Image: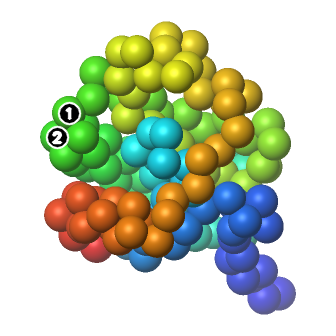
Amino acid sequence: MEKPEFQLHERLAADTISLGRSRLCEIRLMNDRTWPWVLLVPAFAGIREIYELTGEQQQRLMEESSTLSRGMMAQFSGDKMNVAALGNMVPQLHLHHIVRFEGDPAWPGPVWGKQSPVPYTDDELVGMRRKLEPVLSLLT
């Protein structure tokens, strides 16, 4: 029996911008310039929960998440790093990494549902990619 091929969930594809691949994950930027917000999506079909990954895959995911979190906090000088794997709206396993700042539009509450996303302009997207480049280079 053939293993199903990984496909990014349509909601993630619509709401995010590709930043490339790590050894384990699709790396996606949430198209909302309000917060530095990057997702790691393990590139395995049918995975909904972290415990469904093998032990080795779980370890790699935590290493990638920690590397991404550390790099984003250094790059953006945030006050708090929020990491979450909710999956209530999108069942495909994905980890949100959101740099938070005291006084941001949702502080101290969660970012979900606080306001409509504010998409990046082309120039802002170029700048964000440039800022994230050194962080992403650590994930490949």
92, 31: nearer the viewer: 31
Q: Quadrant of residue 20?
A: bottom left
With respect to residue 4, does 87 lie above or below? above
**Pointer 2 residue:** 74
**Pointer 1 residue:** 77
- From the top left corner, tell me how far across and down residue 72 is, in percent: 27, 45
Element class at badge 1: loop
Q: Residue at x 51, y 59 (%)?
A: 120
Are there few (<14), some (14-19), or many (20+) residues within 10 Å of tag 2?
few
- From the top left corner, tell me how far across and down residue 136 is, in percent: 28, 64
Are there few (<14), some (14-19), or many (20+) residues within 10 Å of tag 1?
few
| Quadrant (top left, top right, bottom left, bottom right) of the N terminus | bottom right
Q: Residue at x 77, y 59 (%)?
A: 11
- From the top left corner, tell me how far across and down residue 38 is, in percent: 46, 51
Contact (Cβ within 8 Å) of mark 2 with mark 1:
yes
At label 2, which amino acid type do we have?
Answer: Ala
Q: Residue furthest top?
A: 108
- From the top left corner, tell me how far across and down residue 30 is, in percent: 55, 54
C-alpha span from label 2 to label 1: 5 Å
Element class at badge 2: helix
Whether residue 110 appears in this view of the structure is yes
Q: Residue at x 55, y 20 (%)?
A: 106
Q: Is residue 26 left or right of residue 62?
A: right
| Quadrant (top left, top right, bottom left, bottom right) of the C terminus | bottom left
At label 1, which amino acid type do we have?
Answer: Ser
With respect to residue 83, does 126 lie above or below? below
